């Protein structure tokens, strides 16, 4: 009787204090889908203020989910951001920088990753889309099984392009093997010298769909010159215009195969990176030209995945996180009239900089967490970094990370699910230098060399200066007034915090 009474009392207490909901949130294993867009800027979708392009499917996630106004990828370029997202480790600890298409696997073997952690908790995991974290050891032979790669990093299934759409080899890799490989037409790749007899952008500009700068003027594949040289593998080559459809089909197949068990899908789209090659059904559909068309295409994919989850009746058991790997860029090597046709569109919203920049728009990206029935629709102004997703998803799916797993990843699950940020936290941004945020303060560490010429030539504001920079984003979101001289004590506080992060060697502060 007494036992029964205690149970009854505990149940009432639980209902009153909401611990039931908490229990549900910490013990369920929802499906998790990360839709990761390439180079999507803060202002590139209509729910974040774009007016020249409409993104109804992304907007639907924002309206029915949690829209973050101060969420960040960890770096202003792709490889470092993806590295941090998948390992819970800052990229500078592993010297992660933009990789060529034939680079070996960057993720150290044997470490816990976001997907390997989820695998251990019973998830089936997949990566579909852009990898850009290297594969193999040493020189890759594209005609043999390539390992280690995504499958050795915690994914049960992988269907990826090795690097970027503008880099060779222009083939998909499924598991360990080039997809549609033909042994009678072996693939060779070089980033050092021209190989094979195929035309290049420099030798045969008349064959090009889009003109390109010198770096993007090597082997022509599908009428587009690339970075790097490639020969062979004709049957295996992708057609850029089909890529969004191919990834959508593979993603849907994976979702269908795993609809009855917990799954994690990292869907890393290649839109809206250059070369911007929308499928014909999107071409010319937006007044901004190809850059607008690929925004429509990525919105379509987002809708296709959301609808598939609903069709299967698993939407209430699926957390979708939508975000980007770095800020926006208009001219990134191809003449696609992105600048000429922008027509007043602000890809970075009210923020300064973009891809390759230490200013806010380098890493502040559209970010939405959508989980009908669990995440209450709303807007969150909390500061959040993708490096913290690994620890947060660990907490969501069972128990916190332990040991050296995700050394820089902190559990911010309450923030991800909608709680307001309670206390200011430090947050790192990487972009040829290190910056640190604390509340509305933003400190950009000086960089001895200043802006490199290739960024100056593109008229990209790198945010790199030889002096310390401090901005108060509350009054100056556009980072126009460097107030370092007026706030020496804040500069010192942030420099010390930055140094502490740089010198930390273990899971300090988790
Ligand atoms: C740069 C390329 C750029 C793009 C970028 C990677 C040049 C001059 N520029 O090196 O076109 O491919 O790498 O973009 O080669 S990212 O989104 O994957 O980081
Ligand atoms: Ca990118």
Image (cartoon, rainbow, N blue to C red):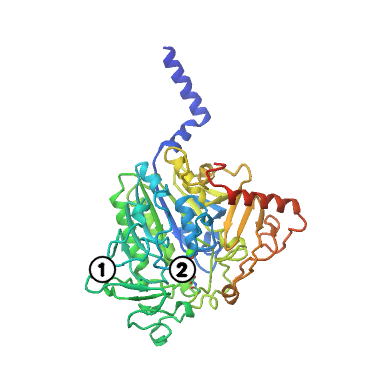
For the C terminus, give its image quadrant. top right
Give coordinates of residue 397: x percent, y percent: 42, 41
Q: Residue at x 44, y 75 (%)?
A: 284
Q: Which mark is residue 218?
A: none
Q: Residue furthest top?
A: 1
Q: Report the residue at 57% width, 62% height from top.
A: 431
Check disc 2: other Cα within 10 Å, few if <14, some if 14-19, many if 20+.
many
Determine whether 22 is above or below 40 in the image: above
Front residue of 305 and 204? 204
The answer as to whether callout 2 falls within 8 Å of ligand 1 is: yes
Q: Nearer the viewer, mark 2 or mark 1?
A: 1
The secondary structure type at the circle numbered 1 is loop
Label drawn at residue 181: 1
Residue 192 spot, x, y in % from top left: 42, 75
Which quadrant holds residue 159? bottom left
Quick check: 145 left or right of 328?
A: left
Q: Is residue 334 visible?
A: no
Image coordinates of residue 185 in percent, x first then y, are: 25, 74
- Residue at image location 29% in from the left, 52% down from the top: 256
In which quadrant is the N terminus drawn? top left
- Tell me, yes or no, if residue 176 can be seen here: yes
Q: Is residue 137 left or right of residue 179?
A: right
Q: Residue furthest right?
A: 486
Mark 2–mark 1 Cα distance, whole angstroms, equals 25 Å
Q: Secondary structure at mark 2?
A: loop
């Amino acid at each position: 009787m007494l036992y029964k009474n205690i149970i009854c009392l505990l149940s009432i207490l639980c209902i009153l204090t909401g611990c039931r909901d908490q229990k549900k949130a910490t013990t369920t294993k929802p499906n998790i889908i990360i839709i990761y867009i390439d180079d999507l800027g803060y202002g590139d979708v209509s729910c974040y203020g774009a007016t020249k392009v409409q993104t109804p499917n992304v907007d639907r996630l924002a309206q029915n989910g949690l829209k973050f106004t101060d969420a960040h990828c960890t770096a202003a370029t792709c490889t470092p951001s993806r590295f941090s997202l998948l390992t819970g480790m800052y990229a500078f600890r592993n010297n992660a920088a933009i990789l060529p298409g034939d680079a070996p696997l960057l993720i150290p073997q044997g470490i816990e990753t976001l997907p390997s952690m989820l695998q251990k908790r019973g998830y089936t995991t997949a990566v579909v889309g852009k990898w850009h974290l290297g594969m193999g050891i040493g020189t890759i032979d594209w005609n043999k099984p390539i390992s280690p790669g995504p499958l050795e990093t915690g994914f049960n299934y992988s269907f990826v392009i090795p690097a970027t759409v503008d880099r060779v080899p222009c083939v998909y890799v499924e598991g360990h093997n080039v997809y549609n490989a033909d042994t009678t037409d072996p693939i060779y790749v070089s980033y050092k010298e021209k190989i094979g007899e195929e035309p290049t952008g420099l030798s045969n500009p008349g064959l090009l769909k889009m003109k390109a700068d010198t770096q993007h003027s090597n082997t022509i594949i599908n009428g587009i010159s690339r970075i790097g040289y490639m020969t062979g593998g004709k049957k295996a080559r992708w057609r850029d215009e089909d890529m969004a459809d191919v990834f959508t089909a593979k993603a849907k197949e994976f979702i269908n195969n795993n609809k009855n068990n917990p799954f994690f899908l990292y869907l890393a789209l290649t839109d809206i990176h250059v070369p911007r090659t929308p499928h014909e059904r999107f071409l010319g559909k937006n007044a901004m030209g190809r850059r607008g068309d690929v925004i429509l295409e990525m919105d379509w994919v987002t809708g296709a995945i959301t609808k598939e989850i609903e069709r299967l009746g698993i939407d209430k058991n699926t957390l979708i996180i939508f975000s980007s790997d770095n800020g926006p860029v208009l001219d990134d090597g191809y003449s696609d009239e992105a600048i000429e046709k922008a027509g007043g569109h602000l890809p970075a919203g009210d923020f300064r900089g973009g891809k390759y920049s230490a200013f806010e728009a380098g890493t502040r990206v559209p970010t939405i967490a959508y989980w009908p029935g669990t995440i209450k629709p709303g807007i969150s102004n909390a500061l959040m970094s993708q490096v913290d997703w690994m620890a947060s998803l660990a907490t969501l799916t069972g128990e916190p990370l332990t040991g050296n797993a995700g050394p820089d990843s902190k559990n911010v699950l309450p923030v991800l699910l909608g709680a307001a940020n309670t206390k200011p936290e430090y947050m790192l941004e990487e972009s040829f230098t290190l910056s640190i945020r604390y509340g509305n303060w933003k400190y950009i560490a000086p960089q001895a060399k200043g802006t490199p010429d290739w960024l100056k030539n593109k008229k990209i504001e790198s945010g790199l200066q030889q002096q310390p920079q401090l901005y108060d984003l509350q009054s100056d979101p556009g980072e126009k007034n460097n107030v370092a001289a007026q706030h020496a004590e804040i500069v010192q506080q942030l420099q010390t915090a930055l140094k502490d992060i740089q010198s930390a060697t273990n899971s300090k502060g988790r």
